[in-house]
């Protein structure tokens, strides 16, 4: 696990060099969803601080105890957020990548105000316009960003996407980068185990890497 982490970091550095980017601009999120605490420990011991989970409840089971043992853990929510889980999400996560509708934006604003806690927020964009996939449609993105900024006074840090499995991810990464530039947003969460090098080349500032670090997930 920790040797995989070292390999991924090396690949990121090589991709940065190739693309003429500064490695400090890109943050690696180790996606620990479906991996147990015992499997996460070696990666923590290797010095990784930034982790991603896709379910609030699973993260609640795993991370409070790990945070007692390790300082400065940064936790990212990269899966869909239900509005009845916003309280827990704001308590637990430092960054939420999956804001994609007004109801969630409102609920997050309310929770952050009442907890007095600022969470970094990214909007998930359904760049492939897939009906089953979360994320705001590209055509509605500009209005949604205005709604968050102007109506809710909610700070939006950037955009996130998950390309369709059967399409060239580069097209989606380039599209996300274009939207972010148009809207003046800095952070770009894109790229997973299979395509993080492509994402780095196209401007990612967060890459979300799971299986290349932890091994294959067991979905049974
Ligand atoms: C699981 C997951 C990842 C990591 O996927 P790997 O292919 O294991 O690297 C990244 N992003 C999201 C949103 C995920 O759900």
Image (spheres, rainbow, N blue to C red):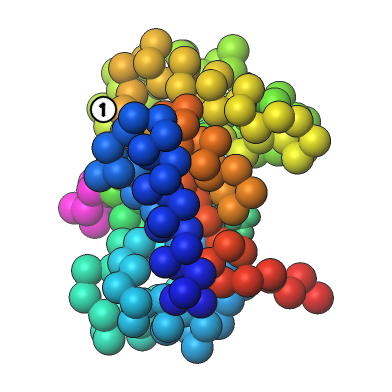
Give the quadrant of ligand 1: bottom right
| Residue 23 sits above or below residue 185 on the image | below
Which residue appears at 51% of the width and 36% of the height?
199
- Is residue 16 within the magenta segment? no
Residue 115: x percent and y percent? 24, 56
Cβ(mark 1) to ligand 1 < 8 Å? no
Q: Is residue 177 above or below residue 187?
A: above
* Front residue of 177 and 98: 177
| Image: magenta residue range | 109-118
Determine which residue is flagged by label 1: 153
Whether residue 112 appears in magenta in the rendering, the answer is yes
- Residue 9 vs residue 148, the one in the foreground: 9
**In the rendered view, does 198 fall on the left or right side of 11?**
right
Q: Is residue 188 left or right of residue 115?
A: right
As drawn, is 194 to the left or to the right of 175?
A: right
Relative image position of residue 209 (x, y in whole percent): 52, 56
Q: Residue at x 51, y 77 (%)?
A: 1
Q: Which residue is rendered at x = 27% and y = 32% of the image?
A: 155
The local secondary structure at tag 1 comes to: loop
Place of residue 179 in the rendered image (x, y in percent of width and height, measured from the top left): 47, 17
Is residue 138 visible in the rendered structure shown here?
Answer: yes
Number of dots carrying numbers: 1
* Horizontal side of residue 113 vs 194, given as left or right: left
């Amino acid at each position: 696990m920790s040797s995989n982490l070292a390999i991924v970091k090396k690949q990121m550095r090589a991709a940065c060099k190739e693309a003429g980017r500064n490695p400090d601009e890109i943050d690696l999120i180790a996606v620990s969803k479906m991996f147990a605490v015992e499997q996460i420990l070696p990666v923590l011991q290797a010095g990784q601080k930034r982790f991603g989970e896709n379910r609030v409840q699973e993260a609640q089971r795993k991370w409070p105890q790990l945070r007692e043992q390790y300082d400065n853990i940064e936790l990212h929510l990269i899966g869909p957020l239900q509005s009845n889980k916003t309280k827990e999400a704001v308590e637990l996560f430092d960054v939420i990548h999956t804001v994609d509708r007004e109801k969630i934006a409102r609920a997050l604003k309310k929770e952050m105000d009442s907890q007095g806690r600022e969470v970094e927020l990214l909007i998930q964009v359904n760049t492939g316009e897939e009906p089953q996939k979360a994320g705001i449609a590209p055509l509605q993105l500009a209005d949604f960003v205005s709604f968050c900024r102007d109506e809710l006074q909610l700070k939006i840090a950037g955009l996130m996407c998950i390309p369709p499995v059967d399409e060239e991810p580069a097209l989606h990464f380039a599209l996300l980068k274009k939207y972010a530039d148009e809207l003046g947003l800095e952070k770009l969460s894109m790229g997973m185990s299979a395509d993080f090098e492509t994402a780095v080349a196209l401007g990612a500032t967060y890459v979300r890497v799971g299986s290349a670090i932890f091994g294959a997930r067991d979905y049974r």
